[in-house]
Amino acid sequence: MIISHGELLGLSVISGGQGFLSGIPQFLADQAMAVSAMEGLCARGIVDKDGRVTGFGMVPVRVVEQYRNADQHVCFNQIRVSVNDDGAVTVIRPVGQDWHLSRMSSQELLVALLKTHTWLCGGGFPGAAESWEPMTIQQWIDARPVDSSLPLVVRNSSVSGNVTEVISYDVRNGSGFAFDLQRLRGRSQQVWQIRSAIAGFLGCLPENEPGVVP
């Protein structure tokens, strides 16, 4: 489902929140903007003319509620994800000035990420990742191959654990590389280790040994 920014925040309010959604830009909505959002939700059949949630609207309202209340949120570049208690994930991604809202299994999202970032399907050798080494942003940029694709920046945050980490992953000469954007440190990692970490963030079963995804 594609909805506007105001409609997305409106769904959060309807589901019992204050409009705040992790990873989604916030702004102060005036009355005209709130009315426009409600009109949009009514036109989509999510609420009726009296502002009550319809049978059809219960699904997107519940999906946004799960996103808002989730303990863990993960961003993959511009894709916002909540890891829900029932094992599914809520995915919110930008589409122009609007947002695409969906719900799927964590395995489905992992497959989609592998299709988009095909280098994640690589393997590597067994063993632990290298130790972190101090690295500036400029050093990280200079070390990236000229013809490399955009890195996969992963922001993983947990409310209960009060933990947030932002790490950029990419591949260099067939080997994976991780750069911690908060602590300014980098290290080489086997691609399978990066894939396993991402699977772990989504609640999938991490890999215990190297392999190549067919």
Image: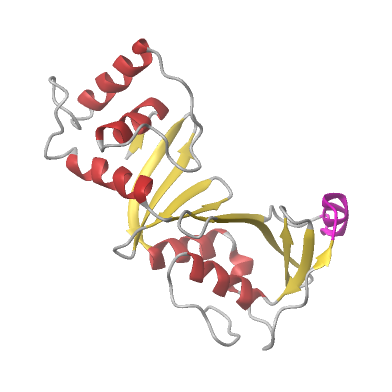
Up the image or down, 36 lies above or below 99; here it is above
**Image point (54%, 86%), residue name:** 208
Residue at figure coordinates x 26%, y 38% from the top left: 15
For the N terminus, give its image quadrant. Answer: top left
Between 46 and 73, the one lying in front of the other is: 73
Query: What span is colored magenta in the figure?
Result: 135-146
Q: Does 43 appear above or below 196?
A: above
Residue closer to the observer: 174 or 155: 155
Image side of residue 59 versus residue 17, left or right = left
Q: Residue 116's image quarter?
A: bottom right
**Residue 89 to residue 209: above or below:** above
Q: Is residue 208 magenta?
A: no
In the figure, is residue 98 to the left or right of 185? left
* Image-based side of 172 in relation to 5, left or right: right
Give the camera-side residue of 153 and 146: 153
Q: Tell me which corner region of the image, top left, top right, bottom left or bottom right, holds residue 204.
A: bottom left
Percent across and percent down for residue 147 are 79, 56
* Rendering quarter of residue 176: bottom right
Q: How is the image coloured?
A: secondary structure
At x 79%, y 61%, the residue is: 185
Instruction: Find residue 125 and report its horizontal and vertical position in percent.
Output: 69, 86
**Residue 128, position in %: x, y?**
69, 83
Counting the numbered discs, the total is: 0
Task: Report the residue at 68% width, 82% height from top.
Answer: 124
Name the residue furthest top.
32
* Residue 156 image point, x, y percent: 55, 57
Asked if 9 appears above or below 31 in the picture, the reply is below
